[in-house]
Image (cartoon, rainbow, N blue to C red):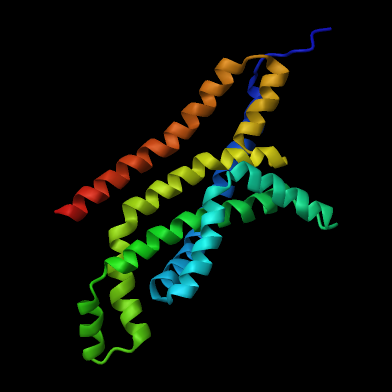
Amino acid sequence: MNLFTPLSWNDAGFILTGVWNTVFISLVAIVFGSLLGLIVGFLRAESNKTMNIVLGSFLDVLRSVPLIIQLILFSTFIGALGYPLDPFVSGAIILSLYTMAFMSEVFRSGFDSVPASMINASRSLGMTYFQAVRYVRIPIGMRAVFPSWLGVALSVIKDSALVSVIGYMELLRTAEQLITRTQQPLMILIGVGIFYFAISYPLSRYGKYVERKMEI
């Protein structure tokens, strides 16, 4: 009996499931990581030195510890407590926090780039503090950080492959199972690489286009 079978059209649904899972968890991490990063970045831009040290230390841990270790430790720890989570939930939580750690620095730099004179001028026109933040600081600051935000988002899409270590059936784990069954690693891995390129390259080009438009 032949233990290995070649790729066939019957595998298309399995592959598409991995593609969808990769896109879905990446979107979840980018959306929640960006929202949390926006909040934390604003707090760091507005907080005193003590708060900055506390938040900065937490973010340094998230940025310094490899993502794969964070995924394994979190999944193992939660399971040891008797509350095992679905691989998607565990992966989405850690990937979102990991994204937040980088997005917060992107957004903080955006907030810090807004001249204090603009804030003072808006306040002198009768705006409240929150109105000045909403109508002046956020629009101007966020416009400047879009290329950096896009760079982090692209990294998250590629880093999502690491969630496979905790059992989430994303594209890389799907590919691993197909390789085990078909013994055709070259063809399958080339296909995975083409998928990531097809997503990342257009977004990268768009980011450069937006950056050039902003410089005009």
Q: Residue at x 53, y 61 (%)?
A: 57
Outermost residue, bottom side: 126
Q: State the count of labels.
A: 0
Q: Is residue 163 left or right of residue 4?
A: left
Q: Position of residue 2 (x, y in %)?
A: 79, 8
Q: Position of residue 161 (x, y in %)?
A: 58, 38
Q: Is residue 169 visible?
A: no
Q: Is residue 200 above or below residue 109?
A: above
Q: Residue at x 20, y 78 (%)?
A: 117
Outermost residue, top side: 1
Q: Residue at x 59, y 48 (%)?
A: 25
Outermost residue, left side: 216
Q: Is residue 72 visible?
A: yes
Q: Residue at x 72, y 19 (%)?
A: 181
Q: Position of residue 99 (x, y in %)?
A: 51, 53
Between 186 and 75, the one lying in front of the other is 75
| Quadrant occupied by the N terminus | top right
Q: Position of residue 119 (x, y in %)?
A: 26, 80
- Residue 138 falls in image quadrant: bottom left
Q: Is residue 78 above or below residue 129?
A: above
Q: Is residue 86 left or right of residue 172?
A: right
